[in-house]
Image: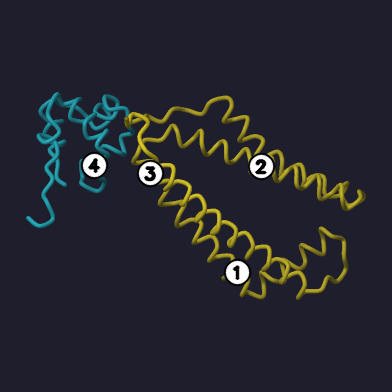
Amino acid sequence: MPSRRKSGTPLQFLLFAAMIIAPLSVLIAIPWLKQQPDDFVFLYSGIAAAITVAAAFVNSVLFDRQLDEWQRTNARFSAQWGWAAGAGVVALLMSLPLFRDWMVSTVADVADVANPDQTLVILAFAFGFGAVVLVQGLCTVVLSIAWTYWKSRPSSDAS
Amino acid sequence: MKNKIRVLRAERQWSQAELATRTGVSRNSITSIENGHFEPSLSLAFAIAYAFESKVEDVFQWTPPSAT
């Protein structure tokens, strides 16, 4: 059925706030986190990342329900091309010495290391980036198969 | 797929926003459909036809590919 988009609900604003506050809290807490044990830092960062991802996911589902089919087609088009363009831009950026230098200097600042091994930093970033792209691809295939089976199930009205 | 939305709107002196409100979609949706840039779902096509108190085939004209 057609559905007209409504303004955001309080829950959506709350979720949006969580998406901003969780990563911001990590950035603000970096000086304090540097003095904490590594396990605590990973736990804190992991929880913040999980909150951000979960809030973004729930928000996107709620937002999608308010869209009509034209807006949903727009969202699908931009999401498909946005993911591809984003991945391509990161790959291109990694080929630029300026970007690699910025990456290394950022790691040096955050980790408080004077001269981090450049190759290790770039390789770690590349593997992390590759892992995200690979797992997203795998999840897309799995969800596509699941959707196919779900939408091909027999009708509940069938006798 | 062609449509007569512009003509039907003009007959009733409805703006695109008016038709959008009556069918429960955004004005952008109506603009795109009217200009032939977006094909509506069956559900929305029926909703548009219902708003005009017309039959779907009186609002939308579909030509089989072999006939083009």
Q: Say above or below: A93 vs B34.
A: below
Q: Colour of chain B?
A: cyan
- Relative horizontal placement of residue B4, taking residue A132 as reference (left or right): left
Viewer-side label of 4, 1: 4
Chain holding disc 4: B
- What's the residue type where badge 1 is placed? Leu
Which residue is label 4 attached to?
A: B33
Q: Position of residue A7 (x, y in %)?
A: 47, 28
Chain holding disc 1: A
Q: Single out the residue that lies furthest toward the left.
A: B67
Which residue is label 3 attached to?
A: A152
Chain holding disc 3: A
Whether marks 2 and 1 lie on the same chain: yes
Answer with mark 3 or mark 2, whichever residue precedes in sequence.
2
Chain letter tied to yellow: A
How would you rate the neighbour count of disc 3 (Cα within 10 Å): few for under 14, some for 14-19, many for 20 or more? few
Q: Say above or below: A105 vs B1.
A: below
Whether marks 3 and 2 lie on the same chain: yes
In the rendered image, which quarter is residue B60 located in? Answer: top left
